[in-house]
Amino acid sequence: MTVFNQNNKGFITKKYPLFLGDDLGLFDTVNIAYPEIEKLYQQQVSQIWNEAEVDLTQDRMDMLRVPKETSDLMIKTISWQHLADSVAAKSIAALLIPYCTNSELEGMLTVQSFFEVIHSRTYSHIVKQTFADPNEMIADTYGNVGVLLRSEAIVKAFNEIEGMPITASTETKRKTLLKVIAALFALEAIAFMSSFAVTFAITETGVFQGIGALVALICRDEGLHTRMDYTVLDILLKDPTWVSSFDEIKSEIKLILDAVVEQEIKWADYLFSEGRNVVGLNATLLKEYTLHMSYPVYKFLQVDFDHQVILENPLPYMDKYIDPTQMQSANQEIQNTAYNIGVIENDTKDLDLDLEF
């Protein structure tokens, strides 16, 4: 990869492929090749926020007063979310930009990674502000086998591109990039959304409203990131060369998706074991929701779905969180003037997505 390629002629040819084209010279958004990606970039930067916008004083009190079976549910959920966003924050730009040859995509990957940093900082902020001993929570995350296993398939796919030699063939690079983007798609469209379902089930009972407000902001971002993953894959899979590479590794893509779904199913059983519970959600419903969110991903990627197809959303309360236009604060009692979910128009709604996000 060249830092500055003065011989790039994309401004003349109007061709800036997403990946594996000529190294970029100028950051060129004069000649935009993919306006759908530019639109997502503009939407993302319009949604800037920070973790200090919500007061967590009441949440700290909630952590002490709510039944242990509910507080433990929130603790386990936050623990995994903290880990998963830490992985995303370190991985997206670092792993994909070296192969990126399109300015609007490079911009989106950069800002997407920045928002994952915001998310990671937010979970750290939650831990710091609501736990009596924050380091105990951090130690528990590192030592929780269930938390680590839940992220195993994603981390494995990310590690593959990190370890790819610079001398790898273009074909190998194409296949590896496809696996990484598919893994990221699964993380953001399936695993994150299943995890948010637990957070919001708890906040729907009237507790942890500050945490709910912050996670709602994160959910809004991840909904946009899911559309980004979809858009990139949709562009690549309209190119016969990338389609050929994808067809050769479709079985590996299926293994990645299957591993994510299986870990989510196991996580649901673990999460609701040992007496942990919350009104309105249980292991069965959470597993059904995971399958509900998984099927469109498999369908889009034309990968066989070996589980029950659940088309109707088993958790209707999630609709107001996943659709930003409905994301009016479920936490309006929060004393926070900067919390503006639902104010920003969802400009991605008109994208041609055959997905139920």
Image: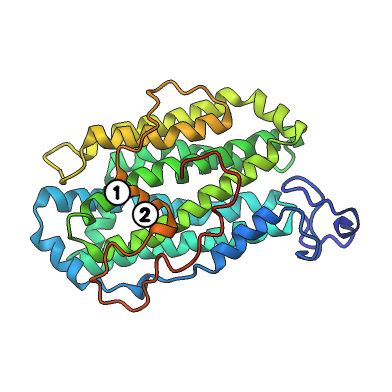
Q: CA distance from mark 2 to mark 1?
A: 8 Å
**Residue annotated with mark 2:** 321
Q: Secondary structure at mark 2?
A: helix
Label 2 packing within 10 angstroms: few (<14), some (14-19), many (20+): many
The amino acid type, in three-letter code, at marker 1 is Tyr
Q: Which residue is mark 1?
A: 317
Residue 269: tell me if it is visible: no
Q: Position of residue 141 (x, y in %)?
A: 29, 50
When asked about the image quadrant of residue 118, the answer is: bottom left
Closer to us: 219 or 326: 326
Of the pair 30 and 325, the residue shown nearer to us: 325
- CB contact under 8 Å: marks 2 and 1: yes
Please tell me which residue is depicted at 46% across the width and 41% down the height of the picture.
356
Query: Which residue is drawn at the image coordinates 25% and 72% (left, top)?
Result: 334
Can you see residue 19? yes
Three-letter code, disc 2: Tyr
Say above or below: 312 vs 336: above
Label 1: state its secondary structure. helix
Residue 83 drawn at (x, y percent): 38, 51
Residue 189 vs residue 24: left or right? left
